[in-house]
Amino acid sequence: MTDPTAAPPTDYASYPSLVDRTVFITGGADGIGAGMVEQFVRQGSRVGFADINAAKAAETLARCAATDPRHVPRFYEVDLVDIAALQQVMATAQADLGGITVLVNNAASDDRHTWQEMTPEYWNDRLDTNLRHYFFAIQAVAPGMIEAGNGSIINIGSSSYMMQEDFFPGYAIAKSGVEGITRTLARTFGPDNIRVNTVLPGWVATERQLTKWWSPEGEEGTLRDQAIKRRIYPAEFAQMVLFLAADDGAACTAQQFLVDGGRR
């Protein structure tokens, strides 16, 4: 059976500057994150990724090993809400990989909820899960990037707040804060040749989306709103991230890049 989350076969670009480049991705076990892990492996990068879901991570590692056994990524099991644990993992990963010059902040949870259901505790949970760890992951890798004299930090946002989607206010509000991190720290780290950008997905056909949130009516509405009348896939989304991680994107910083099929 055809994998509904797999993009049609495509000869994507190869970036010589990504060969052996050290890359760390949060939330890399499945979905968009796994798509990025696999695409960096195809580039010959040295990849580490963190996630709480060890079972899904094992599947991603197996796919990577089948693609290129020379560049199997390293997996670090961690709950990113635990900042002390995240900091320990980041230190270990930097030692394992020989420093980190590309950081992709991706881990998030788009669980549905209403504004009426929101409690102070769940509000904090949404910010902790979808925003707080971005900053502390950057804080962990920035000294090494400064010492190296270069780096690329790519924060994965969400077009949901821009489209005024209201079925997960805690998530959308947290994701709007990603742009604040990007623009503020792009200015901070620019003199050190470190770039900071945001890439925002629209509706990407991941296993989670198709299993938990998909409906015929929902997809019909999404495709109606998109200029490109088809699904967007994780491997396609990853191509923008690869460009920004490579030297080809060296002049890009403090920017938002939408990968959403032209959705309005």
Image (cartoon, helix red, strand yellow):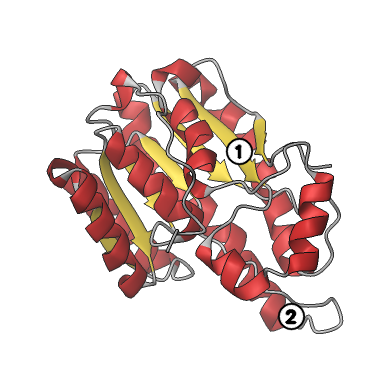
228 or 154: nearer the viewer: 228
Residue lying at 83% horizontally and 59% vertically, measured from the top left: 165
The reply to whether discs 2 and 1 touch (Cβ–Cβ < 8 Å) is: no
Is residue 158 positioned above or below 1 on the image? above
Query: Residue type at mark 2?
Result: Pro
Q: Is residue 250 left or right of residue 264?
A: left
Is residue 149 positioned above or below 262 on the image? above
Residue lying at 23% horizontally and 59% vertically, measured from the top left: 62
195 or 48: nearer the viewer: 48
Residue lying at 52% horizontally and 39% vertically, measured from the top left: 236
* 10 Å crowding of disc 2: few (<14), some (14-19), many (20+): few
Q: What separation in Å lies between label 2 and label 1 (alpha carbons)?
A: 28 Å
Q: Which residue is mark 1?
A: 198
Residue lying at 63% horizontally and 28% vertically, measured from the top left: 254
Question: How far across and how far down the image is residue 181, in percent?
Answer: 62, 43
Q: Quadrant of the C terminus?
A: top right
Q: Is residue 2 left or right of residue 98?
A: right
Q: Which residue is mark 2?
A: 120
Question: How far across and how far down the image is residue 215, in percent?
Answer: 72, 70
Is residue 126 positioned above or below 102 on the image? below
Q: Quadrant of residue 128?
A: bottom right
Counting residues from the start of the chain, the first of labels 2 and 1 encountered is 2
Question: How far across and how far down the image is residue 88, in percent?
Answer: 30, 61
Residue 70 visible in rendering: yes
Query: Residue type at mark 1?
Result: Thr
**SS type, badge 2:** helix
Q: Quadrant of the N terminus?
A: bottom left
138 or 126: nearer the viewer: 126
Q: Is residue 209 left or right of residue 44?
A: right
